[in-house]
Image (cartoon, rainbow, N blue to C red):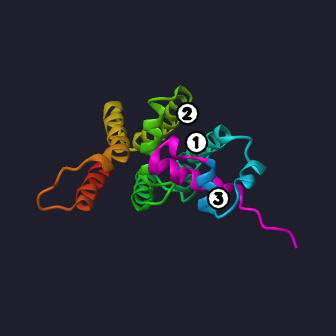
Amino acid sequence: MGVTRTPRSRWIEEGLRMLSAGGPEAVRIEPLAQVLGVTKGGFYGFFKNRDVLLAEILDTWERETTEALIDQVETAGGDGRAKLDRLFTLVASGDGLMTGAAADLAIREWARRDQQVAVQLKRVDNRRMDYLRALFGEFCADEEDVEVRSLLVFSLRIGSPLIAAEHPGRSRKDVLELTRRWLLR
């Protein structure tokens, strides 16, 4: 009976967790192996070096937080409002590694210092905005209205964890629900 290897996906998942917590500098092979409870030699069975791992972390993040999420929304069908409602629900319920905002924020910070990451982030942001525009465009005739709604949703996703403002008489969840209802009218 052979030794069970730690799956490649676990290396990427834990690497993304480290990236989310401390930026790309925090993604180190030895500490990553320790977290996984394996030797760092196992790393080299999957990745040529740390840069390859970082690139795969970014690709996985892009695929899971954009394309897989869009596919999940589209698969269930419905009109633009129904799809937006589903998208809001999926994103709001996602405090997990892939759907939580920590990874997005860490990657945005990383993109400020790394041109390659900035290019990939721009591609992701454009894809997300294009999708939002398409959904809002199904029930909003005014192009400016579509753009404002799309930008508002996009900004809430990115900036919401950073906003510390209080909402007298309402919880943060109540305010987000109020915003969602307004956006879908």
Give how far across and how far down residue 150 sits, in percent: 37, 39
Q: For the residue carrying disc 3, how many other residues have a C-alpha within 10 Å: few (<14), some (14-19), or many (20+)?
A: few
Location of residue 147 with respect to 16 vertically, above or below: above
Q: Which residue is mark 1?
A: 58
Q: Secondary structure at mark 1?
A: helix
Tell which circle, 2 or 1, labels the residue nearer the N-terminal end. 1
In depth, the one of 31 and 45 nearer the eye is 31
Q: Which residue is mark 3?
A: 10
Count of number-bearing discs: 3
Q: Which residues are magenta?
A: 1-28
Label ID, residue 120: 2
As drawn, the residue found furthest toward the bottom would be 1
The alpha-carbon separation of the residues under discs 1 and 3 comes to 14 Å
Location of residue 40 with respect to 158 vertically, above or below: below
Q: Secondary structure at mark 3?
A: helix
> In the image, what residue type sits under mark 3?
Arg
